Image: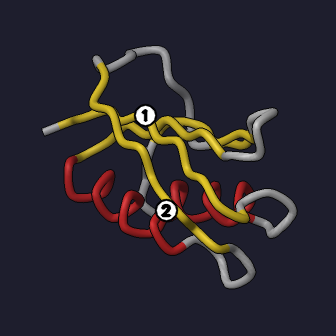
Amino acid sequence: MVVQRHYVVTGRVQGVWFRASARQEGQRLGLLGWVRNRPDGSVEAMAQGETGAVESLEEWLHRGPELARVDGVEVREVSVDPGLGPFCVR
């Protein structure tokens, strides 16, 4: 089943290769979507794909790359967008 979820990740998540690492993980999992920095210091992501793959990315977002410190991950289920492209950094 294809699902789409929106994430906001807080903590020390900018300047620690979070976006690039998330892009690699999303691409490895075969997901569609994107990841970007937000002005408030958090990172925002949108992921679409098979439920198991999206959940794998979600688990990764709770850890992040080695230099990151994830304090929280806000998760919201959203409607599937047929226009999403390959997982990228915005």
Residue 24 horizontal side relative to residue 25, left or right: right
Circle 1 — which element?
Answer: strand
Q: Residue at x 69, y 74 (%)?
A: 68
> Residue 42: horizontal and vertical position, in percent?
68, 46
Residue pointed to by mark 1: 6
Q: Residue at x 54, y 56 (%)?
A: 27
User: Where 54 falls versus 18 (above or below)?
Assistant: above
Q: Residue at x 32, y 51 (%)?
A: 54
Q: Gap between marks 2 and 1, in whole Å? A: 12 Å
User: Where 16 falls versus 72 (above or below)?
Assistant: below
| Residue furthest left in the image | 1
Q: Quick one: label 2, few (<14), some, or many (20+) residues within 10 Å?
A: many
Residue pointed to by mark 2: 61
Q: Amino acid at mark 1?
A: His
Quadrant of the rendered image containing residue 6: top left
| Residue furthest right in the image | 15
User: Where 68 falls versus 44 (above or below)?
Assistant: below
Q: Quick one: label 1, few (<14), some, or many (20+) residues within 10 Å?
A: many
> Residue 29: horizontal and vertical position, in percent?
42, 60
Image quadrant occupied by the N terminus: top left
Q: Amino acid at mark 2?
A: Leu
Quadrant of the rendered image containing residue 90: top right
Query: As rendered, which of 79 and 63 lies closer to the eye?
Result: 63
Q: Residue at x 33, y 33 (%)?
A: 76
Question: Which numbered dot is residue 67?
Answer: none
Query: As rendered, which of 53 and 12 lies closer to the eye?
Result: 12
Query: As rendered, which of 81 and 42 lies closer to the eye?
Result: 42
Of the residues under marks 2 and 1, which one precedes in the sequence? 1
